[in-house]
Every structure is written in C-alpha cells, then in structure tokens.
Amino acid sequence: MRITQAMISKNLIEGLRNNRDRLNETQRKISTGKKHAKLSDDPESFSKAKRLSKQINQNNQYLKNVTKANAWVMTTRNAVENLSSNISQLREISLQGASDDLTPTGRQALSDQIQYIIDDTVDILNQSYLGKKLFAGTKTKVESPFSVGNDGSITYNGNSANINNKISDNLSISINISGQEVLDTNIFTIASNLKTAMVAGSSDVKADLSDVESLKDKINQISTSLGHRENQIYLSQNRLDTANMNLSSLLSDTEDVDLAEAITAYNSQEIAYRAAMQTAADVLKLNIMDYLR
C-alpha cells in the first residue's frame, strides 16, 4: 500500500490529538484530585466510590442525630440533678421538722420553704430545650407541661410517650424523660404531705421521712437511666467516627489521585507532546496551528 502525504499528515495529527487528550486528562486529575470523572472511565471504581460516599453521608446524618440526642439528654440530666438537689433540701427540712423543739413560727417557715421547693420543681419540669419542652413526652410544644391550679393542685398536660432518635442503621434511643415518669415518683404528693405535716407537728413529719428517702432513690434512678443513655450515645458516636475514618480511607484509595505521580506524568506527557508537535512541524514543513484548526 502506498503511503501518501495525506496519510502521513492524518496519522501525525491523530497522534498529536491523542497526546493532547492524555495531557488534558492528567491535568483534570491534578485539578480535581479524582481519578475518574464519569462512570464510563472505570465503572467498578466509580460505583464503589458512590457506595462509600453514600454510607459516609448516612453516617454523618446519624452523627447529627447523635449530637442532638446527646444535647437533649445532657440538658434533661442537668434538670433532673436540680430535682435531686430539691429533694435533698426537702430531706433536710424534714429532718429539721422532726424535732420536737420547733416553734409554730419555725414550722411555718419550713412549710413555706417546702412550697418554694414545689414551685421550683414545677419550674424545672417546665424547662425547654430549643423551644421544645423537655418533660412533656412527645407533646413538646405544649405551653406548660405542668400547670398549677388556684387551689395549688398540679396538672400534667403532656403524655408518657418516648422521643426516639435513630443513631445507627439498627439502633434508636429514647432521649426523653416524660413528666409522667416524674409524677410516678409521687414527688408532688410527698412534698405536699410534708408541707401539711410540717405545720401539724413533729410526729406527722417523722411519718413522712421514709417517703422522702424513697423519693430521693427514685429520682436518682431516673438520673442513672439518663447516664446510661449518655454512655450509649457516646459509644455510638465513637463507632460512627471510626467507621467514617475507615470508609474515608477506602474512598480515598478508590477515587483520589496520587498527586506526586500525576504531576510527574503530566510533566512527561507535556514534554512528549511538545516534542511530537515539533516533529510534526519538521516533517510536514507546516505551521502546527494549521493542523489543529
């Protein structure tokens, strides 16, 4: 077969275009830091990278849920610790009231302190976090989970439902303590009975001492339950962080370019491209730009 000038020109120009395409592709890898630009470049690696990215994004969403859950549980636990402090004060007052030496005026003063504790307890249980009531069950937008009537009676306006946060593929955690759980400790009944007994006399107060002691234990149990949830959240956060570190490493191996290697390749390809252009110009005795139009 006869090799014509047109065939030589065509082959030279085709070679230049191939060199230029390789140079452009290497430049893209360096600028993006990614091995592949589209699925057709490497279907297996591209699909693997997509799967890894999806899992990382899902874990990041779980980490957001974990952060929110942890903040809610910590805020609730602080509130419960304040309740526990109130119960400790109630116990101290009851021990004082058990003395036979108190005057009626002194008993009334202690009774007034108990009323303050009751009022403060209602205030604690009506606390909000980010505009949502902590102790209202799932009725977090209720105005006041606990309301006080004109006769001093206390009404719970929430429910006993749990607020669950999904913190992994197979794990959800209840982050709230409902007001009903607190009511079930008989905190208001015990405090109200003690307030009445304080005025009546030391024997009545002594009869209520055991109830105050049991109340302290019940509030501590709630606090312990929240502590267990904090630990569970902490462990889940660590697992998710570790998983994302491993997934990110795999993703980097799958899609990230070795920049040092790519830059070296680019420099070699650029030298080869320039040499090929010079060769083509010398062989064809034409300006290279004529071929690239």
Image (cartoon, rainbow, N blue to C red):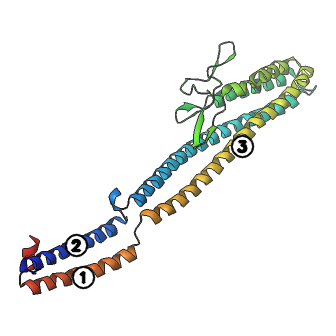
Task: Kindly report which numbered mark, 3 or 2, lies closer to the viewer in this rendering.
Answer: 2
Dot 3 falls on a residue whose secondary structure is helix
| Label number found at residue 272 | 1
Q: Are marks 3 and 1 in contact (CB under 8 Å)?
A: no
Q: Quadrant of residue 293?
A: bottom left
Residue at the spot 85% in from the left edge and 31% down from the top edge: 213
Single out the residue that lies furthest toward the bottom: 282
Residue at the spot 75% in from the left edge and 40% down from the top edge: 224
Type of amino acid at the residue the image marks with label 1 = Ala
Q: CA distance from mark 1 to mark 2?
A: 11 Å
| Label number found at residue 228 | 3
User: What residue sits right under mark 2 in the picture?
Assistant: 18
Task: Kindly report which numbered mark, 3 or 1, lies closer to the viewer in this rendering.
Answer: 1
Q: Quadrant of residue 66?
A: top right
Type of amino acid at the residue the image marks with label 3 = His
Dot 1 falls on a residue whose secondary structure is helix
User: Is 117 situated above or below 171?
Assistant: above
